[in-house]
Image (cartoon, grey):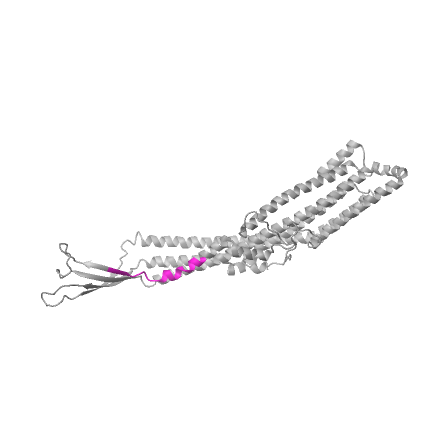
């Protein structure tokens, strides 16, 4: 507003007029044309009364936004409620669906890991003579059926099941963490969109009020009670409101696109929000230490990292088990044709039994290296757990501080700044009618009220967004509910 004051004083210097000169001209006007003057005063008072009514209605909309408010969605009263938006996201968001599908896939692994290797069945033609391929000429010729089964060293299968089960547990914990994060993002984006709708509504109300100001300034200038600079200032502020409306519409479109992405809606699809959210409360929240204790006990991100550490430990134990031998057992049955020349009669069939043991002959370059690999994996997952814990600690402290600051700002605006700004506007309008203050002061008071209204919704949206982020950081959905 310093620019406006400079501009106004510049016009006064060029025109050679000031408030005192304007007041001194009024007696002459009253004497020359009293009836005309009364008519002009009546019109000016009527316009000022309309402007004052607009200010009162505008200020009341902070505490009761549902009263006398035109929807920003073109007339629709109902819109996408916040709880419905979260529910839609959890049922249709592709990233969340992908995480859930991955967790379900991991759930199918433990039973596979604990099963024995598939047995092997063999059909063999043994010791056939190449000159005739006869089955009864040579006594060692036989048709053989074999069966073999690999048997891991005792304990290996249990460790494989443990590792797979821990990974499955981590998968479902990551799904819960994704749900928390997704809900926080939806809530944050929803409140940004709601805040921008209210800002657009306030801008539109102020445009109507500023048009009244332009009309007031023009009426007073036409009858000699005002200055041309008042008209120019009112027109300038109206143009600035039109510019701010364009910026606000652009920001709303961007926020709407982000919310549509979270809800898996088509780009450009219109999202209308209700005029009043179901819950505008800003409750007290636990201390940072209490939130951190709850997060350590229940946060799904920490549960996922702990499960992955357990899976890495199971694989480390398994790699040490691999230094011990595995086994395989088998049996075969050989069918022979022809007669036995020594004993007479048909040749007897053969039966075979097999028992095999693997020998870790290359343990130095294979099993020992595998143990080192698994040790590094355990260290890596422990460090990731520490990193996740540190991130949660930082997020809890930051979002709680942000929430408390925004909540205090909301309270200050609602209980002090906005009522005071409303009273100032009313007082300035009354004083302006009797030329006790100039038009610039009236304009400044209205702009202060206008900016306070915008700041109120921005602070409320920021507080709600910070509360949503805090609930996700602490793993406490009940914080937001």
Q: Residue at x 52, y 55 (%)?
A: 92
Give the residue at x 71% y 37%.
Answer: 3
Question: What x and y, as percent, mark residue 269?
Answer: 57, 49
Identify the residue at horizontal 41%, vertical 58% (top origin).
311
On screen, 241 above or below 331? above
- Judge from the rendering whether residue 372 lies leftward or rightward of residue 344; answer left or right: right
Q: Position of residue 96 (x, y in %)?
A: 50, 54
Closer to the camera in the image, 243 or 323 = 243
Q: Furthest-right residue in view? A: 31
Please tell me whether residue 406 belongs to the stretch shown in magenta. no
The answer to which image quadrant residue 280 occupies is: bottom right
Q: Position of residue 116 (x, y in %)?
A: 33, 62
Q: Residue furthest left?
A: 342
In the shown orientation, is residue 77 left or right of residue 145?
Answer: right
In front of the other: 318 or 149: 149
Residue 159 visible here: no
Q: Nearer the viewer, residue 135 or 441?
A: 135
Q: Position of residue 390 (x, y in %)?
A: 51, 53
Question: Is residue 112 part of the magenta span, yes or no?
Answer: yes
For the C terminus, the quadrant is bottom right
Total numbered labels placed on residues in the image: 0
**Would you say residue 296 is visible in this rendering?**
yes
Q: Which image quadrant: the N terminus?
A: top right
Q: Which residues are magenta?
A: 103-122
What residue sits 19% from the left and 63% below the top?
Answer: 334
419 left or right, relative to 170? right
In the figure, residue 183 lies in which quadrant? bottom right
């Amino acid at each position: 507003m310093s620019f406006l004051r400079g501009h106004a004083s510049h016009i006064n210097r060029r025109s050679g007029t000031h408030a005192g000169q304007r007041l001194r001209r009024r007696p002459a006007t009253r004497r020359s044309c009293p009836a005309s003057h009364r008519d002009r005063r009546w019109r000016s008072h009527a316009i000022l009364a309309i402007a004052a009514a607009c200010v009162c209605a505008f200020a009341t909309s902070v505490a009761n936004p549902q009263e006398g408010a035109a929807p920003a969605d073109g007339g629709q009263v109902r819109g996408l409620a916040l709880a419905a938006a979260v529910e839609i996201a959890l049922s249709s968001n592709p990233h969340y669906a992908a995480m859930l599908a991955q967790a379900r896939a991991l759930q199918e692994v433990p039973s596979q890991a604990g099963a024995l290797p598939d047995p092997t069945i063999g059909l063999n033609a043994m010791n056939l003579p190449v000159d005739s391929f006869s089955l009864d000429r040579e006594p060692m010729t036989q048709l053989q059926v074999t069966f073999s089964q690999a048997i891991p060293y005792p304990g290996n299968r249990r460790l494989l099941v443990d590792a797979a089960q821990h990974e499955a547990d981590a998968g479902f914990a990551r799904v819960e963490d994704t749900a928390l994060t997704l809900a926080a993002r939806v809530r944050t984006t929803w409140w940004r969109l709601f805040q921008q709708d209210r800002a657009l509504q306030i801008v539109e109300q102020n445009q109507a009020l500023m048009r009244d100001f332009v009309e007031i300034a023009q009426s007073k200038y036409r009858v000699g009670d005002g200055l041309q600079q008042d008209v120019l200032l009112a027109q300038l502020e109206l143009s600035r409101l039109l510019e701010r409306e364009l910026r606000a519409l652009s920001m709303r479109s961007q926020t709407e696109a982000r919310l549509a992405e979270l809800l898996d809606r088509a780009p450009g699809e219109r999202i209308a929000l209700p005029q009043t959210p179901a819950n505008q409360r800003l409750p007290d929240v636990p201390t940072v230490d209490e939130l951190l204790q709850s997060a350590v006990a229940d946060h799904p991100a920490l549960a996922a990292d702990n499960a992955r550490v357990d899976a890495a430990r199971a694989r480390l134990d398994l790699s040490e088990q691999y230094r011990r031998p595995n086994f395989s057992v088998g049996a075969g049955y050989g069918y022979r044709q022809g007669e036995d020349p020594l004993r007479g009669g048909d040749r007897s069939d053969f039966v075979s039994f097999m028992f095999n043991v693997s020998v870790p002959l290359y343990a130095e370059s294979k099993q020992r290296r595998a143990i080192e690999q698994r040790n590094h994996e355990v260290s890596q997952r422990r460090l990731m757990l520490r990193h996740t814990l540190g991130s949660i600690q930082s997020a809890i402290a930051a979002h709680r501080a942000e929430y408390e600051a925004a909540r205090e700002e909301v309270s200050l605006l609602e209980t002090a700044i906005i009522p005071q700004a409303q009273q100032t506007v009313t007082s300035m309008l009354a004083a302006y009618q009797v030329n006790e203050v100039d038009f610039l002061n009236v304009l400044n008071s209205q702009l202060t009220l206008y900016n306070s209204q915008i700041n109120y919704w921005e602070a409320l949206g920021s507080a709600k967004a910070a509360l949503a982020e805090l609930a996700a950081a602490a793993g406490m959905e009940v914080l937001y509910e």
